[in-house]
Image (tube, rainbow, N blue to C red):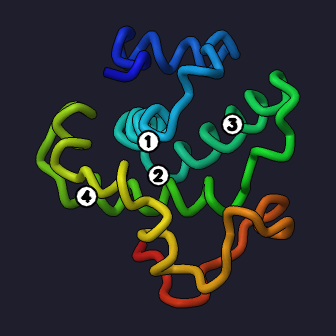
């Protein structure tokens, strides 16, 4: 079990928002959980703002400025919100069990929206690129 499960959603949000979350614990699944917490608590628009700023702050604190990716962050919130809208679950554990492809095939999911590699593109890291294959549904 991943280490982020040792704390509640409230503790996770508080630790991350105050830059006290351990970087080694911030796995892909932890990224998904944070997005899920923000979307379900604040809605997609506020979630995107909070998630983006806090990921940038986290990367800056740990001297990992090149790790933040504006496009992947934007796409993650859009994708997570779409899956949340399809779900009847009330906690992240049930949600991620229902949609395990978010853990195992996230790059493939993003590739249905973007033709290029937005994970390594310098432009995608610096600014949000809109999808060129199909739009995110509002």
Residue at disc 4, secondary structure: helix
- The x, y position of residue 8, in whole percent, is 35, 12
**Residue at coordinates 43% horizontally, 41% vertically from top-left?**
32
* Nearer to the camera, 23 or 58: 23
Mark 3 to mark 4 CA distance (whole Å)? 23 Å
- The x, y position of residue 87, in whole percent, is 17, 52
Q: Earlier in the sequence, mark 3 or mark 4?
A: 3
Mark 2 to mark 3 CA distance (whole Å)? 16 Å
Disc on res. 109: none
Q: Earlier in the sequence, mark 1 or mark 3?
A: 1
Mark 4 to mark 2 CA distance (whole Å)? 11 Å
Disc on res. 55: 3
Disc on res. 44: 2
Q: Is residue 59 left or right of residue 108?
A: right
Instruction: Determine contact: label 2, label 1, CB under 8 Å.
Output: no
Mark 2 to mark 1 CA distance (whole Å)? 14 Å
Q: Write down the residue under mark 1.
A: 32
Q: Write down the residue under mark 4.
A: 85
């Amino acid at each position: 079990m991943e280490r982020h499960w040792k704390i509640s959603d409230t503790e996770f949000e508080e630790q991350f928002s105050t830059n006290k979350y351990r970087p080694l614990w911030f796995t892909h699944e932890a990224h998904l959980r944070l997005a899920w917490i923000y979307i379900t608590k604040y809605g997609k628009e506020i979630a995107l703002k909070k998630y983006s700023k806090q990921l940038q702050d986290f990367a800056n604190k740990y001297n990992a400025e090149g790790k933040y990716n504006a496009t992947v962050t934007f796409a993650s919130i859009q994708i997570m919100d779409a899956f949340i809208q399809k779900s009847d679950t009330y906690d992240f554990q049930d949600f991620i069990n229902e949609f395990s492809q978010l853990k195992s095939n996230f790059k493939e999911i993003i590739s249905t929206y973007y033709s290029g590699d937005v994970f390594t593109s310098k432009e995608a890291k610096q600014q949000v690129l809109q999808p060129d294959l199909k739009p995110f549904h509002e």
